[in-house]
Image (cartoon, rainbow, N blue to C red):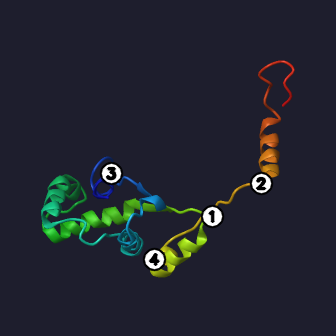
Amino acid sequence: MKQVWELAGYNGREKLKTVFLLDESDIIEESFLEDVQNILSSGLVPNLYTPEDLGRVRDEMKSSYKLAGNTEEIPDLMNKFFYDRVINNVHLAYIVSSDLKIFSEQCRSFPALINNASFIFYFAWPAEGLYEVSKVFMKNIEPLAEGMDV
C-alpha cells in the first residue's frame, strides 16, 4: 500500500492517477476492510507511515513540493501536501464475487463501502445472448478458409 501511495504522491509523472485494485481474496483479515473503509471515507490509512517513513517521504517529494509553489519546508504542511496528492490520485477498485450475502454483511460492518463507493454488478450472460452478440460482430468478417460459414 505504501508503494501505491508514494507512486500517486510523488513518484513518476506529475499528478499520476493510480488505481489500487483490491480483490476479496486479498482480504485476509477483517482489519483490511477497516483500511478500505478509511481509504473510502478519508483517503488515508491511519498508522500506515511511521514518523521515520514520513521523514523519508518528505525528503523524496521536496522537489515536487517546491515546484508546486511552496517555499517553507514545514513538516505538517509537507505531509498535508503528500496526503492531498494521494487523495486526489488514488482510486480504489474493490472486486467481490457474486455472493451478495457476504458483501452485504461487509457493508453493514463497514458503511463506507456503501456511502462512498459506486457499484458495477456483472452477472453471467445466457448462452443465447453471447451467441447473438457474437453473430452481430462476426457477420462482416471474412472467413479464414474456403467453405467456412460465418
Identify the residue position indicated by label 4 in the image. Answer: 112
Check disc 1: other Cα within 10 Å, few if <14, some if 14-19, many if 20+.
few
Residue at horizontal 17%, vertical 63%?
A: 54
Of mark 3 and mark 1, the one earlier in the sequence is: 3
Q: Quadrant of the C terminus?
A: top right
| Residue kind at label 1, given as amino acid type | Phe
Tell me the mark number nearer the camera, choosing from 2 and 1.
Answer: 2
Residue lying at the far top in this picture: please name it.
Answer: 146
Q: Position of residue 39 (x, y in %)?
A: 38, 69
Q: Is residue 77 visible?
A: yes
Of mark 3 and mark 4, the one earlier in the sequence is: 3
- Which quadrant would residue 123 be assigned to in this image? bottom right
| CA gap, disc 2 and disc 1 | 16 Å
Identify the residue position indicated by label 3 in the image. Answer: 14
Callouts 4 and 1 close, C-beta under 8 Å: no
Residue at horizontal 82%, vertical 50%?
A: 128
Check disc 4: other Cα within 10 Å, few if <14, some if 14-19, many if 20+.
many
The residue nearer to you, when weighing 105 against 139, is 105
Of mark 4 and mark 1, the one earlier in the sequence is: 4
| CA gap, disc 4 and disc 1 | 18 Å
Q: Position of residue 118 (x, y in %)?
A: 55, 69
Above or below, 114 against 49 in this view is below
Element type where label 3 sits in the image: loop
| CA gap, disc 3 and disc 1 | 33 Å
Above or below, 26 against 33 in this view is above
For residue 126, which numbered disc appears in the image? Answer: 2
The residue nearer to you, when weighing 89 against 97, is 97
Of mark 3 and mark 2, the one earlier in the sequence is: 3
| CA gap, disc 3 and disc 2 | 45 Å
Residue at horizontal 17%, vertical 71%?
A: 76
Q: Position of residue 31 (x, y in %)?
A: 35, 72
